[in-house]
Amino acid sequence: MFYKSTRNSNLKVDSAFAISQGISEDGGLFVPESIPGLTLDEIKYISGLSYSCRAAYIFKKYLTDFTDAEIQYCTDNAYSTKNFETENISEISHLFDGTYMLELWHGPTCAFKDMALQILPYFLTVSAKKLKIDKKIIILVATSGDTGKAALEGFKDVEGTQIMVFYPECGVSPMQKRQMTTQEGSNVGVCAVKGNFDDCQSGVKKIFTDNEIRAALDENSLMFSSANSINWGRLVPQVVYYISAYATLVSDEEISLGEKINIVVPTGNFGNILAAYYAKHMGLPVAKLICASNINNVLTDFIKTGVYDKNREFYPTCSPSMDILISSNLERLLYILTGENDQKIKEWFSLLATCGKYEVDEDVKKKLAEEFYGGFCDDNDTKAAISSVFDKYSYTCDTHTAVAVKVYEDYRKETGDKTKTLIASTASPYKFSASVLDAVCKEAEGMDEYDMIDKLYELSNIDIPQSLAQLKNKPVLFKECIDKTDMKDFVLKSFNIK
Ligand SMILES: *Cc1c(COP(=O)(O)O)cnc(C)c1O
């Protein structure tokens, strides 16, 4: 299996190269040359395996330059109860008849990002070894809240790496901020940026593709890589949990082998839902992919009209990890839907960079509408969804997952579709206690984050993640806040690059 760039179909690199580079030099994203197949027999077979072995089975189809032993080393280390609260790594809860919550937040930082970021450092260090790279790898991360902490936890004290995380000063929840600014580890850095997530992401992307910096890094025996979902090594672990969840639903006799299900994903950067798309096109029986957005609904409009227009107001919401107007991974989807037309992709994404807007062709619009349903809701609807799920089903969901629940309800009302459905539950409610408490009991006022955790425990009876409770006694180690125009200088200074 080789990888191409969405902006250069002639490129041919192996997965170790794609993972260690993070992003292609031409500014495009790495994509597999074809989507490997998965038969129903294989799904049945993996249903008898542990999560870690299921993951290894899928990775072998994508990372063909890795040996079986290398893959097993990665999966054994990442997917164990050392890092995850549950032996199953992800859990499935029943919401109501035929509707299942895929809980992806039982890892160390309580968001689904752990599913990929616990394994990415292993992929990356193995890749570097295979390629005989003896440079130190600097991981630059832009985060809307959850990726930052998950990447810090994944990479802390990993030999041969340094990590620097940029987060929007006012764009993350208090708990998310505390998680990041108290991060321990000898190779970690965290910095706030005066701006929003898109500013952080654009800043990081610019630094990545800056030839001057690249040359300077080279002289200093350093190189950049990415832990954002632009890195293929982030995306491929996410394909696994959809397949794994389906296999579990089959072995639990909730669905029959081959029965199609819908998948609902609360979406920001389009990474998580793109992984579901890959799973579907490998052969997983999936009907509709439902893309749920908050009020920053650029994707809803795009799926409905084929016009991507980021020229709109940016709203901070109670689901901050989805406060995004430039969804990077859409580039991979469009590359596939255009029949791998790298010229088109270059044209559209240069329009996005210059005018903030592009419109796809009619045939792409048609394919989009066939595969996806897009919907959105605002903060009031999000909180109403948390409250009604809590009252009706005694289930406590976080704000991001609530957006998915609400959009799914709208979808069912609109279409009458009763296909069994898997909803990606992307964060622990404890990560967003203020909003969750506000929704279920209106009693959060005046409480600090830790009082809220206790209160939420009283109400929900969900075990309190120790990693969050322990933050209370940790000192804040990172206080810096910079202008978005200073990110490059900050990186040069931090890593002593002349
Ligand atoms: C990152 C994140 C999302 C959005 O996922 P994408 O892959 O960026 O679409 C949704 N919910 C939570 C809790 C997240 O951390």
Image: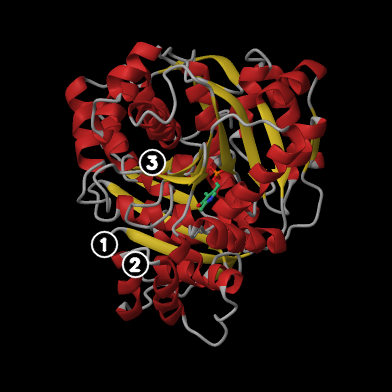
Please name which of the two marks, 3 or 1, marks the residue nearer to the observer: 3
Is the CB–ligand 1 distance for label 3 below 8 Å?
no
The residue at which mark 1 appears reads as: 186
Q: Position of residue 25 (x, y in %)?
A: 53, 30
Name the residue at 79% across, 57% down: 313
Q: CA distance from mark 1 to mark 2?
A: 28 Å
- 372 or 316, which lies in front? 372
Badge 1 density bin: few <14, some 14–19, many ≥20, Cα 10 Å: few
The residue at which mark 3 appears reads as: 116
Q: Position of residue 451 (x, y in %)?
A: 42, 82
Picture disc at residue 464: 2
Report the quarter where the N terminus lies. Answer: top left
Name the residue at 65% across, 50% down: 406
Q: Secondary structure at mark 1?
A: loop
For this orientation, the residue located farthest to the bottom is: 446
Vertical position of residue 376 compared to residue 468: above or below? above
Q: Earlier in the sequence, mark 3 or mark 1?
A: 3
